[in-house]
Image (spheres, rainbow, N blue to C red):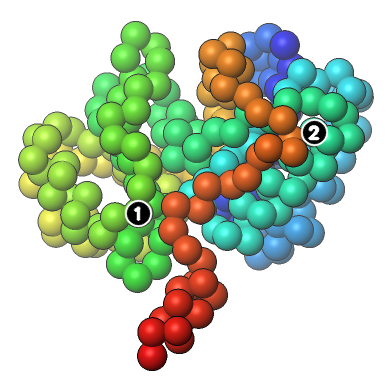
Amino acid sequence: MKILGIDSSGLVASVAVIEDGQMLAEYTINYKKTHSQTLVPMLDEIRSMTELDLASIDAIAVAAGPGSFTGLRIGSATAKGLGLALNKPLIPVPTLDGLAMNAWGSGKLVCPIMDARREQVYTGLYRFTEGRLAVIRKGSPMAVTDIASVLNEMGEAVLFLGDGVPVYKEVLDGELTVEHEYAPAHMSRQRAGALAVLAMEYYNEGRTETAAEHKPEYLRPSQAERVRAEGRKS
């Protein structure tokens, strides 16, 4: 079984290939260039370096949202184009699930947070049970103070990761009464390798779709849509 993973849902662009439980390659970059400039060249570099015949992959895993509207569209378009050209199924992986997978083996509650602007984050709650990622609270947009209240009520130690950490760390430190810590740099951002490993489980559970069916899950309207809606009210 060979899975190609693509994640451009946030600031990071990442591509990986796993085969039968082994990581063949992963290319992750967190720099100033846009995903439209980096994603396809990264994929081509992996293909070249590993002598990968794209026709040999079994499925394409893609971060399905939430995240950056532009980033999700670029990742979705890339995955859909490959899926249609190669006649391969897509495995949509919720972005927060893939991000939480970075913390595999943690004994704490895992709380990925992605900056959603306006003092909100995209977040969910996870834990690892018997070597598998369990969703405790499904991903949704929330105020930072609200997720802090939820965690205080649960009363468990928590591990945070994601691009929302540097933005809201000071708020979390002030609001939280439970033990908490923040993942180090190599765990704290999206990685297509983690996404692809989780996608393997989803594939075995039959959680696939055709390239034509795939649509990213934004979880809330874009800024342009909100501006239009507010304009209609005025």
In this orientation, does residue 28 appear?
no
Name the residue located 71 percent from the left edge and 63 percent from the top edge. Answer: 33
Question: Few, some or many C-alpha atoms within 10 Å of disc 2 (few <14, some 14-19, many ≥20)?
Answer: some
In the image, which disc is placed on residue 30? Answer: none
Name the residue located 28 percent from the left edge and 29 percent from the top edge. Answer: 136
Question: Which quadrant is the N terminus positioned in?
Answer: top right
**11 relative to 199, above or below:** below
- Along the horizontal axis of the image, is 133 left or right of 156? right
Location of residue 144 in the rendering, given as x and y in whole percent from the top left corner: 25, 58
Q: Earlier in the sequence, mark 2 or mark 1?
A: 2
Question: Few, some or many C-alpha atoms within 10 Å of disc 1 (few <14, some 14-19, many ≥20)?
Answer: some
In this orientation, does residue 189 appear?
yes
Residue nearest the viewer, comparing 52 with 200: 200
Element type where label 2 sits in the image: helix
Q: Amino acid at mark 2?
A: Gly
Where does label 2 land, which residue?
Answer: 83
Location of residue 87 in the rendering, given as x and y in whole percent from the top left corner: 84, 27
Name the residue located 61 percent from the left edge and 52 percent from the top edge. Answer: 72
In the image, which disc is placed on residue 141? Answer: 1
Location of residue 160 in the rendering, given as x and y in whole percent from the top left corner: 32, 42
Name the residue located 87 percent from the left edge and 40 percent from the top edge. Answer: 44
Q: How many marks?
A: 2
Q: Amino acid at mark 1?
A: Pro
Question: Which quadrant is the C terminus positioned in?
Answer: bottom left
